[in-house]
Amino acid sequence: MTNLSLQIVMGRRKRKKRGFPVGVLVGFDEQVIHIWKIFSESVKKYDQIPLERKWKNATEKDRYHFYEDLLNILRDLIERGLKSIFLVSPQGKNWSVGFRTHLEKHHRWLIGSRGNNQASFGQISGKARSYNEVRYLLEQETTKEIIKKTTSQEAYFLIKELEKSINSNNPNIKVLYGLREIEDVIYEGGKRDDSVSDKLDYLLLTDEFLENHKQKNRVYRLKQIANNKGITTKIISEESPAGERIAQFGGIMSFKTVGYF
């Protein structure tokens, strides 16, 4: 994974580099749940949930509603392709563990599913109430290892889906590799025609392909238009087993999942 130090780019005319999406960080606090979007070069506050009662005063029914409110926010992010979820609680508190237990009891589809909705969860000890706290947390080696493990698990699920598509005999299952071939399909019909999302579910790129391509702007344009047309785009570390598999096809692939047929 590329730099997670989240250094601020200084200079009047310089813009802070956001980087590619990594996942979602959920910070459990005494009376607020903070939701952050994590990128390879930055972090951005997404939402927060004020709690009517502190955790220590919450009934079982209260906790159920807290977790359901959180899930309603996460569901939208997961559907948009952010499937690595990092749960953060202060040391000695079991609030994030309680959320995992809630999912296992009421939403097995999210953690035990074999379909496209399955998400990967990592547990982190610390505080994530403010930008500075999140930045500090992401700089810790233990956090980096948890992020690496969690995102690698998500990538593993994607590669399993890719292999099913590659081995499918269904003519409706498209598997494309090569920048030009993928561009031809995604750009078909113009920028506003999103019917291509019926043909393709995922666009996968390795971080090395994205950062080192001689026509980087061309690759970023494809990535943006694919997103706009409803195709989930994922950047995967080439050092991971999943990244090595994508690199075998040139570092970029797009495919339709078998589960939809």
Image (cartoon, grey):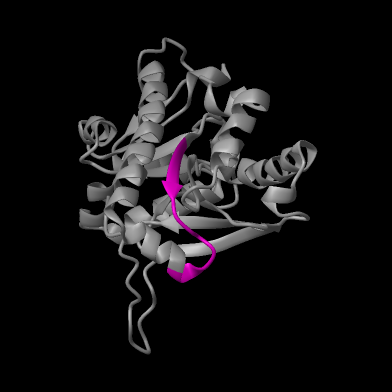
Horizontal side, residue 93 vs residue 147: left or right? right
- Looking at the image, is 175 positioned above or below residue 224? above
Q: Magenta residues?
A: 121-132
Q: Is residue 55 magenta?
A: no
Looking at the picture, tell me which residue is in the foreground, 1 or 17.
1
Image coordinates of residue 128 in percent, x first then y, are 50, 60
| Farthest bottom residue in view | 12
| Farthest top residue in view | 169
| Residue 174, quarter of picture | top left
Q: Which residue is drawn at 63% across and 59% down?
A: 47
Image coordinates of residue 15 in percent, x first then y, are 39, 77
Residue 254 visible (yes or no)? no
Horizontal side, residue 62 vs residue 164: left or right? right
| Quadrant occupied by the C terminus | top right
Q: Residue at x 30, y 49 (%)?
A: 142
Q: Residue at x 79, y 37 (%)?
A: 61
Image coordinates of residue 86 in percent, x first then y, are 47, 46
| Residue 202, quarter of picture | top left
Looking at the picture, tell me which residue is in the foreground, 246 or 100.
100
Looking at the picture, tell me which residue is in the foreground, 201 or 234.
234
- Looking at the image, is 16 positioned above or below residue 119? below
Residue 49 visible (yes or no)? yes
